Amino acid sequence: MKPTRLSYTILIIIGIILIAVMAYFYNQGENKKESIDKKGENEKIEQSKYNGVDIITNTYEEDTYHKAIHYPKFEKELLNEDIKKYVSRMEQGFHDELSKYNKEALRERPAQLYLTFYIYPVIDQLYSIVFTEESYVGGANSRQSNTVFLVDLKNEQFIKQTEIINDTKENREKLYNLLLNAFKQSEEYSSFLVEEDLRDWIENKDNKFSNMYLTNQAIVFEFDKYEVTAGAAGMPVITLPFKQVSEIVSAEWLDRLKIEDTTNNNEPDESDESITEDKTNQEESTEEDMSTDPSSTEKRVALTFDDGPHPKNTLTILDLLAQHDAKATFFMLGSRVDFYPNIAKKVAEDGHEIGNHTWDHKDLTTLSPEKIIQEVQHTNEIILEATSYSATILRPPYGSTNKEVENSIDITSVLWTIDTLDWQSHDPEAVLEIVKENVKDGSIILMHDIHESTIKAVELVLNYLEENGYKCVTVSEIL
Ligand code: NI
């Protein structure tokens, strides 16, 4: 049939409609993508307690060594470069030392490296980052030191200590007297101070006060062991309140720090809240009793997630769990709960169990009883503060525990029956295979919510468990 003018018109109209429809859907897709991306970014920033700072946690469990590395990640890539360089220098030093040792001896007693940090907000977008490096190679050999970074996020730069205290002879003398005075007044350190060593320290021209950092109220000096005291003092921390140091602080910093001094947040409010919000576990235990009703003949497994919370991955896993009406247990690191209290809170609000995974992932069997208690208590406190929930179970890092550890703490240790090795393989299919081969009624499955690849693994595992009649419950319900 010969095309008429009418059929041409119809064709053109159809063409225009088609183009319009395609353009519409294309735009929708783009908008949707963009809004998801934006949402993701914004959430990430908001969900850290420290604006513009995230925490990266990497743990390694090899047969010759354990490593737990924590470091901050800033929005500004420029700042991250220096931090990363520092972190790899520390790791390289550890591995260099390891290479000098016999592998068999190391397998018997794995070496350890812990790199952790504390973060102190000073004024708006200014933080002190204080790293602590600890390594144990060959048993008795232990090393500990600190490294300070003063980070100005607003101006995207690190600040030198000598910008805060002008490095003049006069100022050094004043600083010496301030420190001497503080040492002498300290109950903890006064008897251990070696005055000549402090004198040497202040007169050393290479000393640029790199062990000095700021909090929102004081200048702090953290000395190495034996640096200015006898070994029994450990690593002494001397705090000089701002009002004491006004004579030695540069004019610029006097100004910057003083401004913030008057607009300081009222911290007492927070601690009041955490006390009044205190809630016991009694409700939880009655709930447990009901769910362990023998009338249910379902096979049950406990999914457990270690080393979090994570600002994105944990939330995605919570969504997946909700879709499958599954409950899980999250063994959290105190250092990460400190960064992401709202993520921890959401986990608790969704009805999952929260367990203690220590503050910074140290091997508890290598610590003194006091240190063990500190690791566990400090973490319980921050979990309670963030979630109003008391953790009643502990998963010792690397599954490493012994009688001494168990006797030091009054909290139940929970290990696992299936190790998915998700942290090593980063392969969702491999994780699923391990679960398929080993799962049975009462299994406790170990995964890590800090790895992105674990999200897909969780999806596969949840589908598999559901298809095979397993119910996902908390670890305490299995116990
Ligand atoms: Ni762990």
Image (cartoon, rainbow, N blue to C red):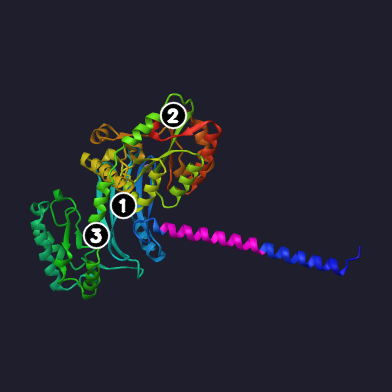
Q: Amino acid at mark 1?
A: Thr
Q: Residue at x 32, y 48 (%)?
A: 386
> Counting other residues with Cα less than 10 Å from the Cα at mark 1, is it few (<14), some (14-19), or many (20 or more)?
many
Q: Residue at x 66, y 64 (%)?
A: 23
Q: Nearer the viewer, residue 20 or 49?
A: 20
Q: Quadrant of ligand 1?
A: top left
Q: Residue at x 10, y 65 (%)?
A: 177
Report which residue position mark 1 lands on. Answer: 116
Report which residue position mark 3 lands on. Answer: 266
**Cα separation between marks 3 and 1:** 28 Å
Report which residue position mark 2 lands on. Answer: 442
Segment tinted magenta in the rendering? 23-44
* Rendered location of residue 103, percent (x, y): 36, 40
**Cα separation between marks 3 and 2:** 48 Å
Q: Name the outermost residue toward the right.
A: 1
Seen in the picture, residue 6 relative to 381 is either above or below; the reply is below
Q: Main secondary structure of the magenta part?
A: helix
* Rendered location of residue 155, percent (x, y): 35, 71
At mark 3, the secondary structure is: loop
* Rendered location of residue 105, percent (x, y): 32, 38
Which mark is on residue 176?
none
* Rendered location of residue 287, percent (x, y): 38, 33
Seen in the picture, residue 372 relative to 249 is either above or below; the reply is above
Q: Amino acid at mark 3?
A: Asn
Q: Amino acid at mark 2?
A: Gly
Q: In the rendered image, which quarter contains the C terminus? A: top left
> Disc 3 or 2, which lies upstream in sequence?
3
Seen in the picture, residue 24 relative to 299 is either above or below; the reply is below
